[in-house]
């Protein structure tokens, strides 16, 4: 269960020419690890997630999810793959106002025709895992911003995804709640073995990641990790 992006180029129409949003990007995210993606606004971070989520087909390059090359899949097969193997967490929680936390999660399983009891049990387990067992019957307006984002994360895990894609999950949260959401995401990633890509603009969150990728003008670089004990002398 891993995510592999190889030589991805993505362009968008831009007047008479095309804008290169991703420029030969390669990235491997092993199961059970979190890759943080940083970079200035407009550098291509959300485009990278959209390609990994199979929501946007790149001009060139390969997206291999969970060992499967997505290139040959039909629209219907991609939709099924997204539903069953990919969890997506966007900046805004986008919860349905009329549903309780538990119902938001169960609605996901319903889409996939799972038995109601299994869905209830899984929803309860995940709400527990994100520390919201006691909020299961609250609607979004009765939850704090941090709690809503945790419901959002639990919902993305409902179908046991192989790949978890998260776009600036902490941007609407204060520092302390943001750090708590980051810690939760990295620990759920290890426990559940997902390959997680997490876009963040907050440098204080990077220490929790297994690898940090930097995107600039559509090009991705993986700076060498600083070895334990600090950088070697003479640098
Ligand atoms: N649907 C789109 N159509 C045209 N251009 C887009 C579209 N989405 C993003 N872009 C452009 O692609 C570049 C990368 O955008 P994006 O991936 O959203 O960057 P980031 O998430 O790092 O802010 C930007 O120049 C943006 O304006
Ligand atoms: Mg973005």
Image (spheres, grey):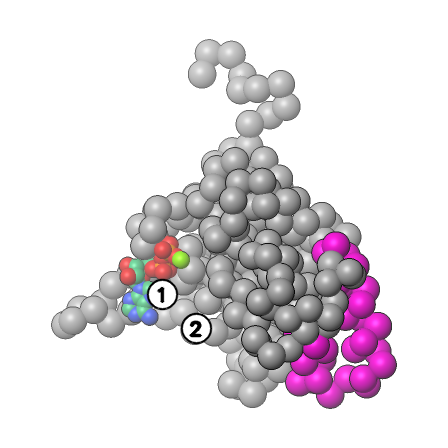
**Residue located at (52% from left, 36% from top):** 204
Q: Which residue extends farthest front?
A: 142
Side (left or right) of 124 relative to 19? right
User: Horizontal and vertical percent for residue 123?
Assistant: 77, 70
Chain part drawn in magenta: 103-131
Quarter of the image containing the N terminus?
A: bottom right
Magenta stretch prevailing secondary structure:
helix
Using a 10 Å C-alpha cutoff, classify the residue at mark 2 as few (fewer than 14 neighbours), some (14 to 19) or many (20 or more).
Answer: few
Using a 10 Å C-alpha cutoff, classify the residue at mark 1 as few (fewer than 14 neighbours), some (14 to 19) or many (20 or more).
Answer: many
User: Horizontal and vertical percent for residue 113?
Assistant: 73, 88
Nearer the observer, 59 or 107? 107
Picture quadrant where residue 15 is located: bottom left
Q: Is mark 2 within 8 Å of ligand 1?
A: no
Q: Which mark is residue 10?
A: 1
Nearer the observer, 133 or 36? 133
Task: Work out how far the residue at label 1 is from the one at label 2, CA to CA, in angstroms.
Answer: 9 Å
The residue to which callout 2 is attached is 56
Q: Secondary structure at mark 1?
A: strand
Residue 115 in magenta? Answer: yes
Residue 95 shows in the view: yes
Pointer 1 with pointer 2, Cβ within 8 A? yes
Side (left or right) of 113 relative to 72? right
Picture quadrant where residue 97 is located: bottom right
**Residue located at (60% from left, 68% from top):** 140
Q: Secondary structure at mark 2?
A: loop
- Identify whether 232 is placed above or below 205: above
Quarter of the image containing the C terminus?
A: top left
């Amino acid at each position: 269960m891993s995510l592999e992006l190889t030589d991805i180029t993505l362009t968008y129409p831009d007047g008479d020419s095309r804008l290169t949003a991703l420029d030969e990007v390669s990235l491997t995210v092993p199961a059970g690890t979190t890759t943080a993606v940083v970079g200035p606004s407009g550098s291509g971070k959300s485009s990278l997630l959209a390609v990994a989520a199979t929501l946007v087909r790149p001009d060139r390059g390969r997206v291999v999810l969970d060992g499967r090359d997505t290139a040959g899949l039909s629209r219907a097969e991609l939709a099924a793959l997204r539903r069953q193997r990919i969890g997506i967490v966007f900046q805004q929680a986008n919860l349905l106002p009329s549903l309780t936390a538990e119902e938001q999660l169960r609605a996901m399983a319903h889409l996939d025709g799972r038995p109601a009891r299994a869905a209830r049990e899984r929803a309860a387990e995940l709400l527990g895992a994100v520390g919201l067992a006691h909020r299961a019957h609250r609607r979004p307006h009765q939850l704090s911003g941090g709690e809503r984002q945790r419901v959002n994360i639990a919902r993305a895990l409902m179908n046991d995804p192989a790949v978890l894609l998260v776009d600036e999950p902490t941007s609407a949260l204060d520092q302390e709640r943001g750090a708590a959401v980051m810690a939760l995401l990295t620990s759920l990633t290890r426990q559940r073995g997902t390959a997680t890509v997490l876009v963040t603009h907050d440098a204080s969150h990077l220490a929790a990641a297994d690898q940090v990728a930097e995107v600039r003008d559509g090009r991705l670089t993986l700076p060498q990790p600083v070895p334990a004990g600090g950088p070697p002398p003479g640098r």
